[in-house]
Amino acid sequence: MLVLGDAHATTPDRRRALFAAYRAADADVALQAGDLMYYDLPVPTYFVSGNNEDFDVIESLRHGRLRSDDVSNAHLLHSTAADVDGLRVGGLSGNFAPTQFEKPRAQLHEDRRRHFVHEDVERAKQLDDVDVFIAHEAPHGVPVTEQYDVGNLHVDAILRALEPDLCLVGHHHEHAEGEFESTRVVSLAPTWESYYTLDPDTLSLTRHDTPTA
């Protein structure tokens, strides 16, 4: 199983790197942790939205009403879960904004659609039997290098409720590993630097250099 961090695949170079990772992994399915920004994909890809996306596409995927030749094999996890290669994979789409969190999702417009809200978190906490959880925001316990303290209490609450074995995180463009209570947490390097393969039987995650296109 292929695992990808942020792709930002709106430029030719970044898009070539994304497809180089798919080719190198030669996997039948992929997981991706947000800021994908390109949605016509070679294999079924289960992803969460990040803070940089085409939010018209994301909202259409969220509501199951997308009809576009530019979108293929893109499966959005939005406080939902899917069975992927024998694993139960759940995800929380979006990033946190304190000024938006208590609003109903229907009140988020334009770029504000990038955020998760209270109802998204509560719905995610009700998922069951999740083996792998994907979020764009990190929980506490991930030693990435930022100019602020990394860790979101709402992602913490989801992991505490679900107790997945593995949490995959995007956003920080840096590989780092940590733990939140009983959950192993991995911050993923960006796709133009690395891709990962995940063994669904052991949840062993292996990092690889993304080849030049």
Image: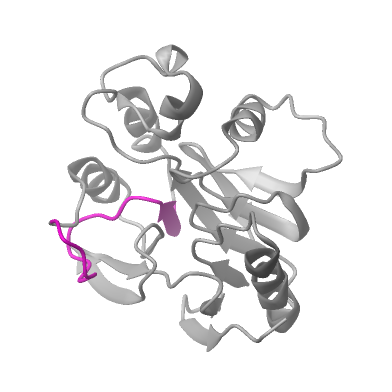
Quarter of the image where the C terminus is located? bottom right
Q: Is residue 100 visible?
A: yes
Q: Is residue 85 visible?
A: no
Is-magenta flag for residue 3? no
**In the displayed structure image, the side of residue 74 where residue 50 appears, left or right:** left
Residue 207 position, x and y percent, is 49, 84
Task: Work out which residue is located at the far left of the displayed protein and give it.
Answer: 149
Residue 114 position, x and y percent, is 44, 34
**In the displayed structure image, the side of residue 20 where residue 196 appears, left or right:** left
Q: Overall secondary structure of the magenta stretch?
A: loop
For the record, the magenta segment spans 130-148
- Residue at 34 percent of width and 62 percent of height: 172
Seen in the picture, residue 65 relative to 178 is either above or below; the reply is above
Residue 131 position, x and y percent, is 44, 59
Quarter of the image where the N terminus is located? bottom right
- Residue at 66 percent of width and 76 percent of height: 21
- From the viewer's side, name the closer residue of 138 and 163: 138
Place residue 22 in its image quadrant: bottom right
Seen in the picture, residue 37 relative to 2 is either above or below; the reply is above
Residue 68 position, x and y percent, is 82, 35
Seen in the picture, residue 40 relative to 180 is either above or below; the reply is above
Place residue 176 in its image quadrant: bottom left
